[in-house]
Image (cartoon, rainbow, N blue to C red):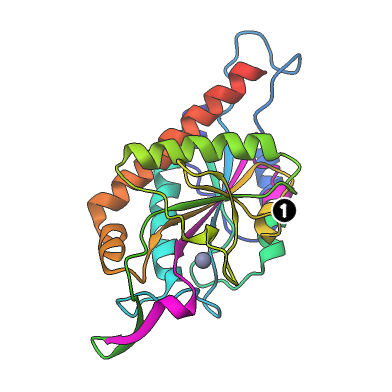
Amino acid sequence: MSEKGLAVIKIPIGFAGFIFLLAIVFGLTPFSCGPAQAAGTKPPLMTIVLDPGHNPKQPGALGNQGIYEIVYNDNLTAQLADALRAAGFAVLLTRSPSQNIGLEERARIANDFNADLFLAIHHDSAQPQYLEKITHNALPAYQDKMPITGYSIFVSKLNPQFADSYRFAELLGQGMLALGRSPSLHHAENIQGENRELLDTRLGIYRFDDLIVLKKTTVPAVLLEVGVIVDPKDQQYVNDKNNQKAIVGTIVSAVRKYERSRAERH
Ligand SMILES: [Zn+2]
């Protein structure tokens, strides 16, 4: 099957073993280099596992429009999966929108699939003392008491591929800055529930060693908080279709740069 054909294969969700078998059948082996790569042949593009954060039973943060985080995560991840496939990458989602899976299982899927990159997509909130309970169209909702905006990127030093994880985090941060976004620095505040070490303040990269999906993955892994859905301005930004397209384009571009940087080092 041609590489072009591979690009449009929709890989079923779940059943890691079945997927792995499919991967072997269709030659979706991880990016490789060295003697195994026949001279003159183009290496296959990377395989990427996307992890839409949370699940229907635990839908994450409640935003200022009365919509749970999972809705934002699933929406953006679906768009990102389409864009990455269109760019020729093999993409697997850890779960479908209706599926309930645990954190360790998400990491296991990436490991079983021997992905080249694991990217978890989340939307952010703030600590309870910074939030007020409101109603939006009769729906319960939360809103920040002062503006808390921006994106955040997390990596774990317990991930065995920390250097590659960090390289992708940098490319992602540079892309988000170029998009006109600012990093949210509220996770570094010295209060309960936060107090995360900033590895790069300009790019908004935090160290969070014990995040299960980052420390249990044996492949390069990064978590992106796209924006803060309890903040009216940020919610409006991440909910806008054109902005979503721009964010997706930025992530795809970061993945491309990451792939090139890996190829150069091999
Ligand atoms: Zn989340």
Q: Is mark 1 within 8 Å of ligand 1?
A: no
Closest to the observer: 46 or 180? 180
Q: Is residue 23 left or right of residue 82?
A: right
Q: Is residue 231 visible?
A: yes
Give the quarter of the figure containing the C terminus: top right
Three-letter amino acid code of the residue under disc 1? Lys
Which residue is depicted at the point 42% across and 48% down? 80
**Residue identifier under label 1:** 215
What residue lies at 56% left-to-right and 23% top-to-bottom? 261
In front: 221, or 149? 149
Residue 175 image offset from top left, x and y in percent? 40, 37
Q: Residue at x 43, y 41 (%)?
A: 251
Determine the residue located farthest toward the front in the rendered image. Answer: 190
Which residues are drawn in magenta?
A: 109-135
- Residue 79 in percent (x, y) is at 38, 52
Quarter of the figure that contains the N terminus: top right
